[in-house]
């Protein structure tokens, strides 16, 4: 029965890192390339699955190229002949799990898809030659030992501990070649009783560990450079699942490109769970071992793994094996390898997302950019046309109200510019009004698109793709909604179509001037009629020698003309002021439309970009992590 991973040192930070990665996935969805998000989701899925499995087991995967002696080293580490070794390549075709402490391992190995399993007693020696009682591979080349086809130990053939029928009772590791029963099989039959230990105990390599750490699972894996595609697929899958990666190389292939470019370099964040053994060290002189070790160390440092120690070992002589055993034992006993592995996975996943973050948090749209956008949208919405109509309508109304009363009615016959564009209807509520402004010309529509693109580019300046494109698209995709929104905003804006207060005063004065003119004219007409009829005429009063009727006519006419000039000047001034106020009001309305329709989606995209950046950085990678070249815009 497996148990969920307990809270060990780093577990809380791992949980936080995984949560930040989940946030990064949510924010980056439909923005970050799909392959990167798929890789991130795979990391999250693996982390959740591994944390739900046994935390008492540490899975050490042994990886290596063809001929590196990987299986021989596994035999030495386990003290068995379980891992098949042969001159034929490839030898290992299917993963083999050697388990110290079986309880809780079945579900974990099922998750790893490892069928071949062998249980080793917790007291079984590690770091000793397998069952022959001599050094592994003595008399043969390291890594080229030939195993018996039936998998039996030759030591067992002369073992006196045989049954009455002459059948050898093989050592305890005989069952390694038989897979563990599955969970379903265990329901139908009980566990097999372990075979009795061999009477012949192999000697321990000097300095090796005498007891295995419970909870260790050692995986012998196929060669990663195998010509069989299935072997490569197994290795690639398990490099992403095991807790510790033990790479076994030989002096001939330690710099192999397939190893470094395909596996070690991409796993540069996994230095804390990476071990590297330089096998077949007995074939080199001491100086050559130092040179190869130094060269390999430089390569690892260049790939981002400066903390990985190169351990020269020999599966044939046992040289360096105790040091490797101690390293594996320390990791297994720490019970934190799974957590460190998942933390490394989280760091790597975040590092792969780092090129898609902005160098700095993206600022919200500036006031200048928003004002410029509102001006462009106002021009496209016909604000200049409306402002001109307001100006002309004011002057028309002013002339109709302050002109000479005798002819002012002629001005009322001229069409109202505001009514012509349907912006002066008192029979409709403001929210129901629609203007009759000309449909946006294609050239003007292109101007709007250009304004939106410029606005998006100004907000996303310095931000690489995909966020630069998404910010710009957030602005441009609103173009279809702008026409109606702007027309509605213009229609609902107060255009100040009412009368100005001075119109009434001038109108009264105009009527007074007309009355004076009429009085003088009427007086003269009466005098003319009386004279024509030869009737007595009353003496006409004079002022400074000028007849009063004549003065009334001249005064009324002059006052009317003067009032007309003054009214025209006041109308021009008032029209300009009203047009200015209306223009500002219209631009404010367009700015609100820009805020709601354009700026708000852009701000939301900026916040999404910043949230993605914060989640990626919080997941673990420092800013010193090497950034990939930023994709071009």
Image: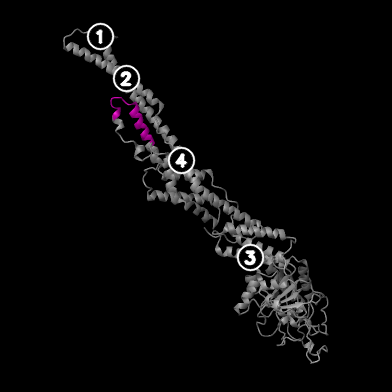
Q: Nearer the viewer, residue 14 or 36?
A: 14
**Alpha carbons under labels 2 and 3: distance apart:** 93 Å
Which element type, helix, strand or loop, lies under badge 2?
helix
Asked where in the image residue 105 lies, by quadrant, the reply is: bottom right
User: Which residue corresponds to mark 3?
Assistant: 45
Identify the residue shown where x is 30% and y is 24%: 405
User: Is residue 229 at least partly visible in the picture?
Assistant: yes
Which label sits in the foreground, 2 or 3? 3
**Alpha carbons under labels 2 and 1: distance apart:** 21 Å
User: Which residue corresponds to mark 4?
Assistant: 587
Residue 612 point in image, percent of width and height: 60, 55
Which element type, helix, strand or loop, lies under badge 1?
loop
User: Which residue corresponds to mark 2?
Assistant: 513
Label 1 CA crowd tier, 10 Å (few <14, some 14–19, many 20+): few
Queried whether the magenta region covers residue 248, the answer comes back as no
User: Which residue corresponds to mark 1?
Assistant: 540
């Amino acid at each position: 029965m497996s148990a969920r991973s307990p809270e060990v040192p780093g577990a809380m930070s791992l949980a936080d890192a995984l949560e930040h990665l989940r946030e990064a996935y949510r924010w980056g969805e439909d923005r970050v390339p799909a392959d990167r998000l798929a890789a991130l989701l795979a990391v999250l899925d693996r982390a959740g699955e591994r944390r739900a499995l046994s935390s008492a087991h540490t899975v050490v995967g042994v990886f290596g190229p063809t001929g590196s002696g990987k299986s021989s080293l596994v035999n030495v580490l386990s003290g068995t002949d379980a891992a098949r070794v042969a001159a034929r390549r490839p030898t290992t075709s299917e993963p083999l799990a050697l388990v110290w402490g079986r309880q809780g391992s079945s579900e974990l190995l099922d998750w790893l898809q490892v069928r071949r399993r062998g249980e080793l007693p917790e007291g079984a020696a590690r770091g000793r030659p397998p069952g022959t009682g001599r050094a592994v591979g003595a008399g043969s080349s390291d890594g080229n030992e030939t195993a018996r086809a039936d998998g039996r130990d030759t030591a067992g053939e002369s073992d006196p501990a045989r049954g009455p029928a002459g059948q050898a009772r093989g050592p305890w590791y005989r069952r390694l070649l038989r897979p563990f029963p599955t969970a379903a099989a265990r329901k139908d039959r009980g566990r097999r009783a372990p075979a009795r230990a061999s009477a012949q105990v192999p000697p321990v390599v000097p300095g090796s560990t005498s007891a295995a750490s419970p909870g260790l699972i050692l995986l012998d894996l196929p060669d990663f450079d195998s010509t069989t595609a299935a072997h490569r697929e197994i290795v690639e899958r398990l490099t992403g699942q095991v807790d510790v990666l033990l790479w076994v190389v030989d002096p001939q292939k330690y710099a192999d490109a397939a190893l470094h470019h395909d596996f070690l370099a991409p796993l540069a964040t996994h230095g804390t769970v990476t071990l590297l053994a330089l096998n077949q060290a007995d074939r080199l002189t001491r100086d050559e071992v130092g040179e190869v070790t130094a060269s390999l160390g430089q390569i690892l440092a260049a790939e981002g793994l400066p903390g990985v120690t190169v351990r020269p070992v020999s599966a044939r002589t046992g040289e360096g094996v105790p040091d490797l055993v101690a390293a594996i034992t320390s990791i297994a006993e720490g019970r934190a390898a799974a957590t460190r592995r998942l933390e490394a996975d989280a760091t790597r996943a975040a590092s792969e997302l780092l090129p898609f973050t902005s160098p700095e948090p993206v600022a919200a749209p500036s006031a200048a950019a928003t004002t410029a956008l509102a001006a462009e949208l106002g021009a496209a919405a016909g604000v200049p046309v409306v402002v001109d109509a307001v100006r002309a309508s004011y002057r028309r109304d002013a002339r109709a109200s302050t002109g000479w009363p005798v002819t002012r009615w002629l001005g009322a016959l001229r069409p109202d510019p505001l009514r012509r564009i349907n912006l002066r209807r008192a029979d409709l509520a403001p929210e129901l009004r629609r203007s009759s402004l000309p449909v946006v010309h294609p050239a003007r529509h292109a101007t709007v698109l250009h304004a939106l693109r410029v606005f998006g580019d100004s907000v996303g300046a310095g931000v690489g793709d995909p966020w630069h494109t998404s910010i710009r698209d957030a602005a441009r995709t609103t173009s279809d909604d702008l026409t109606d929104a702007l027309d509605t905003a213009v229609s609902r804006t107060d255009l100040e179509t009412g009368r100005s207060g001075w119109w009434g005063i001038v109108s009264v004065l105009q009527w007074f001037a007309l009355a004076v003119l009429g009085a003088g004219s009427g007086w003269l007409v009466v005098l003319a009629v009386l004279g024509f009829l030869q009737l007595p005429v009353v003496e006409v009063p004079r002022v400074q020698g000028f007849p009063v009727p004549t003065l009334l006519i001249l005064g009324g006419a002059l006052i009317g003309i003067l009032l007309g000039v003054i009214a025209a000047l006041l109308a021009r001034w008032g029209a300009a002021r009203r047009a200015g106020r209306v223009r500002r009001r219209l631009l404010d309305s367009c700015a609100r439309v820009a805020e709601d329709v354009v700026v708000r989606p852009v701000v939301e995209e900026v916040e999404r970009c910043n949230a993605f950046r914060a989640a990626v950085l919080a997941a673990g990678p420092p800013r010193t992590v090497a950034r990939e070249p930023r994709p071009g815009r």
